[in-house]
Amino acid sequence: MKTLSVFAILILMVVALGLRKSPDRQLVKQLPTIIQLREYLAAHQNHVEGHPDMILSAAKPISQVFKAGKNSRQNQTYAFSYFKDCAEEKTIVHSVRAVCFQRYQELLKLTQNQDHLTLPVIDSEVQRIISQL
């Protein structure tokens, strides 16, 4: 049985208790960073097949926030804010930011009356990754 990261546990608690209107920036800051990935790859001397566990661990909380926003109008504000913060946070691994941007767009398509929302501002590397997904 795999253990959950502290980040995943926090997301589960937030989802279980009902999402707040805006995410705690610390939850977004818990996503894997570029520096952490570099350190991981250096420690493993770049002999990593597939995606490192640290990247894969981000999938579950991102999925849970998306599901909560999709299934409950009350949770949408939180989900939009979470995905925007994630997509715009320059310290987070680019591939994770790309997934957050895509989830933001998917949620936007499923949601009515969100004209006041703007797409996250992303850099060219994240745009490149999105074009390959």
Image (tube, grey):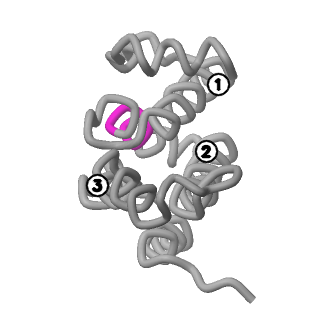
Is 23 situated left or right of 62 in this image? Answer: left
Residue linked to disc 2: 66
Asked whether disc 2 touches disc 3, contact meaning CB atoms under 8 Å apart, the reply is no
The residue lying toward the viewer, choosing from 124 and 84, is 124
| Residue 106 marker | 1
Asked whether disc 1 touches disc 2, contact meaning CB atoms under 8 Å apart, the reply is yes
Q: Earlier in the sequence, mark 1 or mark 2?
A: 2
SS state under label 2: helix
Residue 16 spot, x, y in % from top left: 55, 72
Q: Could you tell me how far apart the alpha carbons at marks 1 and 2 are, in whole angstroms?
A: 9 Å
Residue 108 spot, x, y in % from top left: 57, 21
**How many tags in the picture?**
3
* Three-letter amino acid code at the position of disc 1: Glu
Q: Which corner quadrant of the image does residue 27 belong to?
A: bottom left
Task: Please rate how many residues cluster around mark 1, counting C-alpha atoms within 10 Å: few if below 14, some from 14 to 19, many from 20.
Answer: few
Residue drawn 61% across the image and 44% down it: 66
As displayed, is residue 60 above or below residue 109?
below
- Which contiguous range is marked in magenta? 81-85
Residue linked to disc 3: 29
As displayed, is residue 106 above or below residue 21?
above
